[in-house]
Every structure is written in structure tokens, then in C-alpha cells.
Amino acid sequence: MPLWKIYHPVGAYSAADKKTMAERITRLYGRLPRFYVGIVFQEIAADSFFIGGEPTDRFVRIWVDHIARSLPVEARGWWIDQCNEAIAPFTRDRGYDWEFHIDETPFDIWSIQGMRPPPANSDAERKWIAENRPTPYTREPAQPA
């Protein structure tokens, strides 16, 4: 499950901007159930957001938690580029400075709706993708991603 926490200046994004940005981010994870993808927008007042010890109202900070999948080392640069491209209309193209990082949590210490999620590429995961919701299933042996 990716969770994006987007810290941004007050008034930086309209409700329509947030929806469009959330849709762009969600599309990055096309191989996962859509309900896995969470995005939180958090407005931060300029007097509460400091970079280098100085207040700012031109900075966007994004913290991403990945649980559903881990990025192979060889794909990390490509993935960072994909993420930067998805958010560019809301950061670079608006003249904001921005930064993001990704934390990865082990898959085996995660649950959703009280269930351990199905293994990657399993029949149960395909069902979750099709139905866009978690449903009980019988655990299958892990399959290669």
C-alpha cells in the first residue's frame, strides 16, 4: 500500500488540483488494487514550515510509504523519474521547490481491513484489483512478482 503524505503551503492546491494529483499518483500504481493507494494533503502555514532555518511558502515535501511492493534497486531511478513526472504539474510547473522520499515497510507486517493482503500476482490479488476492495481469501503460496 502506498501512502503519500503531501505537505504544502496553505492554498497551494484547490480541491480540483488535489483530485487530479491523486488520480495521477494512483495511476502510477496500475498493478495494485486502486484502494491500496492513499494520498493525504496537509496544508502547512509559512510560519510553521522552515527550510534551512527560514520560513517558506514555496516548498512542497512529500513522504511516501511503500508496503505492497518493494522497489528493486535497479528500478529505483526509473521510479523516482515516474513520480517526479506525475507531480510536475503541481510542483515544478508552479514554481515550487519540492522534495520527496520513499520508505519501505516489509509486506509481512501489514494488514488491511483486518486481513493480511494476498501475495503479489495471486488469484486473490487479481480479485481485489477487479473488485477494488479487500475480500476474505484462502492464502496461496507466494508467487514471483
Image (tube, grey):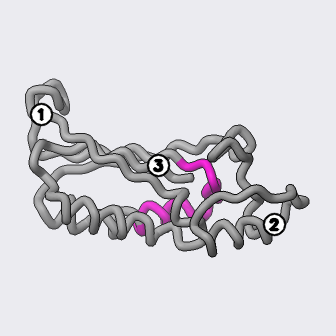
At label 2, the amino acid type is Pro
At label 1, the amino acid type is Ala
Q: Are marks 1 and 3 in contact (CB under 8 Å)?
A: no
Q: Which residue lies furthest to the right in this view?
A: 141
At label 3, the amino acid type is Leu
Distance CA(mark 2)–CA(mark 1): 45 Å
Q: Give the range drawn in magenta.
A: 66-82
Distance CA(mark 2)–CA(mark 3): 24 Å
Position of residue 42 measured from the top left corner of the image (x, y, whole percent): 26, 41
SS for callout 1: loop
In the rendering, which numbered label is found on residue 45?
Answer: 1
Q: Residues within 10 Å of mark 3 (few under 14, many from 20)?
A: some
Q: In this view, does 68 lie to the left or right of 51?
A: right
Residue in the picture at 16% in, 55% down: 13
In the rendering, which numbered label is found on residue 144?
Answer: 2
Indicate whether residue 71 is drawn in magenta.
yes
In the rendering, which numbered label is found on residue 27?
Answer: none
Position of residue 99 measured from the top left corner of the image (x, y, whole percent): 30, 48
Residue in the picture at 35% in, 47% down: 40
Q: How crowded is mark 2: few (under 14 residues within 10 Å), some or many (20 or more)?
A: few
Question: Which residue bears the numbered disc 3?
Answer: 3
Q: Is residue 92 left or right of residue 109?
A: left
Q: Is residue 119 left or right of residue 37?
A: right
Q: Quadrant of the C terminus?
A: bottom right
Residue 45 in the image: above or below residue 85: above
The answer to which image quadrant residue 72 occupies is bottom right
Of labels 1 and 3, earlier in sequence is 3
Q: Nearer the viewer, residue 18 or 104?
A: 18
Position of residue 65 measured from the top left corner of the image (x, y, whole percent): 50, 45
